[in-house]
Each structure stands twice: as structure tokens, then as C-alpha cells.
């Protein structure tokens, strides 16, 4: 089975933290949606004989800028090319202020069965600082409207680790829990140079939070959500029982995926490929790509990275069989210091980081890279 990712890199407004491939000009959006159907046709053989699609995910950008009927046309095109008869989930990312009664009614006529809401915070001051285009009240109304329409598989995003706003995090967590969404993605802010936040940092108008603040806020997120019954199953992701994000979970376990759209990435098990077309080029069906063939060492490093971000951790016997017993033994030896400090648990054929220590996962992962 494979994954299908449909990338819609258009936004009405650029968030202050965002460095994703995106455009704030919507002029080419209609043509780009048609081009996505053409790209699917051209790349129908990318996944080889594995033509059963396990999950479909509309990401961005802001997919909710598209009429639901246009999203269904993309699903219909995919269904004509691959076996999409029984996907485990079809997700669309939405902005809360796009979730009107008319939008939800139209969405119910599509095959979409999971909604990911870009809430980010329930504090209006922080939302303005992030240049979000919705309010806390609109986020609450969006969840309630979707639930009334029968959508129970709802995910909400939160961001923490922003200078000057640590005091609002606890209330945002309380409100997200009270809404009862079954999945929560809570991301620590990373300030990138090309973003509005990055430019503020460069001018000395903003600073990254220090390590003590990061640890305190991460602990608050972990403690409050796990106490509310959410499983901390990946560094930034929490789910009620049975509600893990299946599409993203499949990325972390190395499954193959096809990415469609300007800026989208694909992986066939050995090669990574991404579309480098501008949105203008893409809308004219001028599809340009770059690719890289992963070496055995790169595949090993990627397995270590994705595995240690998850609660299941590393299967040491799999490493020995797939990458060589010598490599597995070296990995276990390198992990000994993390086991001694309590930052890693090793035993019963697995190596994993306890979820309450996930914040240091990058340091652990880097130390185990070959």
C-alpha cells in the first residue's frame, strides 16, 4: 500500500512562522488544481505495481481555500488511476475561518473523513502576532460546526515556545481538551530565517526562548495531554485511543508515497523526488523535479531519525537484518550513555526515548547517526 499527498500551496495570508513552499497570490489556483490532475496522470506509474492507496492527505498551504467539489475531483482522478476503494483515511487541512455552514455542507458530499484544523492558539493576541487570519472564537465554532455535521475524526494544531506568550499555553491546552478533538499536534516553534519571525529575530525585536522555557512548556504540553487521556505517540503528536494520524504515521515507518503539486515530495522506497516548479510554472503543467537516490547509510540514518521520534522506537533486530549486525551493535553501544542518563530505554529488542523526554530526541538521534 502507498500514500497519496496532494499539496495545495496557496494562502490568503502568510503566517509569521511559516517557511513552507506557498504563495499568497490565488490567481493561479484554479489552473493549478487542473494541473494536479494532469500530474497524477503523468506519474501514475511512480508507485510501480503497488497501486492500492492507503491514505490521501490534502496539505498546504490552505486546502480549505478550494471548494470541496474541487477536492473531490482530485479524489475521483486518483480513483481512476489507483485502487482508492478502501482508504483508511482521507484528510484535509482547513483554516478555522473557512469552516462555514456552506463549506461543511459541501464537504459532507465528498469522501473526506478526517479534518486537520490549524488552530495554533486560543489566545487572540498570539494569533495576531502569528499573523493568523482567524480568532479563538472562530476556532471553537469551526470544531462545533464540524462535529454537528458528523465529523468526529478531528485534529487540531497548537504552537508553543513563543517568546512572551508562555502564559497563554495552559489555557490553550485546556480549551483544546475541552473541545474533545481526538488528535492534537503540538509543535515547538522553530524560527526560520526567511520568515517574519526570522526577520524580527535578525533585527533584535524578538528572541528564541531559552532551553529552560522550552523544557517547561514541553513538560506542560506532555503532562496536560497525557493526563487527559491522549497518547504521546510521536514527538509532536498526541491521540486518543484509535485516533493516531495514519497518513503521517506511515511517513514515519518508511512507506512509499506520491506527492502531487508544486513543492510536493515523493518517495518510492529508494529515491526521493520533489517538484521544483513555481506555482506559475506548475499551473501551466510545466512540471520540473529534482531527486536524490538514498544510500544505505542515508536509509539507516533516516530509520534512526523517524523511529526515535515515535513511542515504539527502534527495532534492533530489524537494524541488524537490514543494515548489518555490526551497525546494530555500534548503535547500541552509542546509546549506552543515554540509557545511563535515563533518556533512553533499551530492552526486549527495542530502543526508545520515553515520551516525557522527547524534547531531547534531536540530540539522541544525532549521536546515533553513522
Image (cartoon, rainbow, N blue to C red):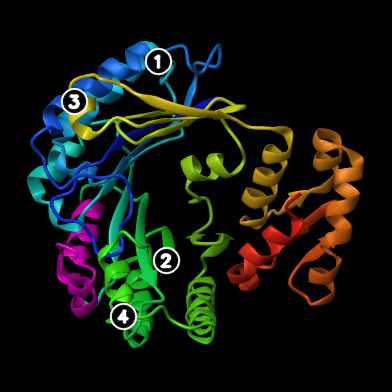
From this viewpoint, is residue 257 visible? Answer: no
Instruction: Select label 1 or label 2 by which is in front.
Output: 2
Q: Quadrant of residue 67?
A: top left
Circle 3/circle 1 CB separation < 8 Å: no
At 55% across and 30% down in the image, what residue appears?
Answer: 292
- Earlier in the chain: of badge 3 and badge 4, it is 4
Specify which label sits upstream in the sequence, 1 or 4.
1
Range drawn in magenta: 124-148
Could you tell me which secondary element the residue under label 2 belongs to? loop
Is there CB contact under 8 Å for labels 3 and 4? no
The N terminus - image quarter: top right
Report helix, strand or loop for mark 4: loop
**Of residues 269 and 288, the one drawn nearer to the viewer in this rendering:** 288
Q: Which residue is mark 3?
A: 283
Say above or below: 285 vs 182: above
Residue beneath the point at 31% across and 36% down: 7
Q: Earlier along the polypeptide chain: callout 2 or callout 3?
A: 2
Q: Nearer the viewer, residue 207 or 254?
A: 207
Decide: marks 1, 2 in contact (CB < 8 A)? no
Q: CA distance from mark 3 to mark 4?
A: 37 Å
Q: Nearer the viewer, mark 2 or mark 4?
A: 4
Residue 26 in the image, given as x and y percentages of width and height: 11, 40
Query: Where's residue 82, x and y in %?
Result: 42, 15
User: Quick check: 23 above or below 29?
Assistant: below
Q: Dot 4 surroundings within 10 Å: few (below 14), some, or many (20 or more)?
A: some
> In the rendering, which numbered label is found on residue 360?
none
Q: Which residue is mark 2?
A: 190
**Apparent side of residue 258 relative to residue 144 in the rendered image (left or right):** right
2 or 4: tag closer to the N-terminus: 2
In the rendered structure, the answer to whether residue 165 lies left or right of residue 24 reads right
Amino acid at each position: 500500500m502507498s500514500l497519496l499527498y496532494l499539496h495545495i500551496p496557496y494562502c490568503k495570508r502568510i503566517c509569521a512562522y511559516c517557511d513552507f513552499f506557498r504563495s499568497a497570490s490565488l490567481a493561479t489556483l484554479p489552473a493549478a488544481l487542473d494541473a494536479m490532475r494532469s500530474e497524477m496522470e503523468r506519474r501514475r506509474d511512480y508507485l510501480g505495481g503497488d497501486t492500492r492507496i492507503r491514505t490521501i492527505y490534502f496539505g498546504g498551504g490552505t486546502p480549505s481555500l478550494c471548494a470541496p467539489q474541487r477536492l473531490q475531483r482530485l479524489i475521483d482522478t486518483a480513483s481512476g488511476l489507483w485502487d482508492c476503494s478502501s482508504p483508511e483515511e482521507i484528510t484535509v487541512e482547513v483554516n478555522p475561518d473557512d469552516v462555514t455552514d456552506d463549506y461543511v455542507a459541501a464537504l459532507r458530499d465528498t469522501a473526506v473523513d478526517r479534518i486537520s484544523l490549524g488552530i495554533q492558539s486560543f489566545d487572540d493576541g498570539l494569533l495576531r502576532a502569528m499573523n493568523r487570519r482567524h480568532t479563538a472564537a472562530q476556532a471553537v465554532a469551526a470544531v462545533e460546526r464540524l462535529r454537528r455535521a458528523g465529523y468526529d475524526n478531528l485534529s487540531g494544531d497548537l504552537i508553543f515556545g513563543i517568546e512572551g506568550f508562555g502564559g497563554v499555553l495552559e489555557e490553550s491546552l485546556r480549551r483544546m481538551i475541552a473541545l474533545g478533538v481526538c488528535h492534537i499536534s503540538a509543535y515547538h516553534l522553530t524560527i526560520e530565517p526567511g520568515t517574519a519571525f526570522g526577520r524580527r529575530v535578525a533585527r533584535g525585536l524578538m528572541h528564541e526562548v531559552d532551553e529552560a522555557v522550552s523544557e517547561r512548556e514541553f513538560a506542560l504540553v506532555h503532562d496536560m495531554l497525557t493526563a487527559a487521556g491522549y497518547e504521546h505517540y510521536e514527538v509532536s503528536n498526541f491521540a486518543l485511543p484509535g485516533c493516531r494520524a495514519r497518513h503521517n504515521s506511515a511517513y514515519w515507518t518508511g512507506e512509499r508515497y506520491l506527492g502531487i503539486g508544486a513543492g510536493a515530495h515523493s518517495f518510492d522506497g529508494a529515491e526521493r523526488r520533489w517538484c521544483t516548479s513555481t506555482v506559475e510554472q506548475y499551473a501551466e503543467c510545466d512540471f520540473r523535479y529534482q531527486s536524490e537516490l538514498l544510500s544505505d547509510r542515508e536509509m539507516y540514518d533516516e530509520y534512526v531519525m523517524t523511529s526515535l521520534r515515535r513511542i515504539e522506537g527502534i527495532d534492533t533486530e530489524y537494524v541488524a537484518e537490514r543494515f548489518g549486525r555490526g551497525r546494530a551493535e555500534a548503535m547500541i553501544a552509542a546509546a549506552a550513555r543515554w540509557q545511563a542518563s535515563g533518556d533512553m530505554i533499551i530492552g526486549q529488542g527495542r530502543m526508545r526515548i520515553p515520551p516525557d523526554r522527547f524534547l531531547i530526541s534531536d540530540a539522541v538521534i544525532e549521536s546515533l547517526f553513522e
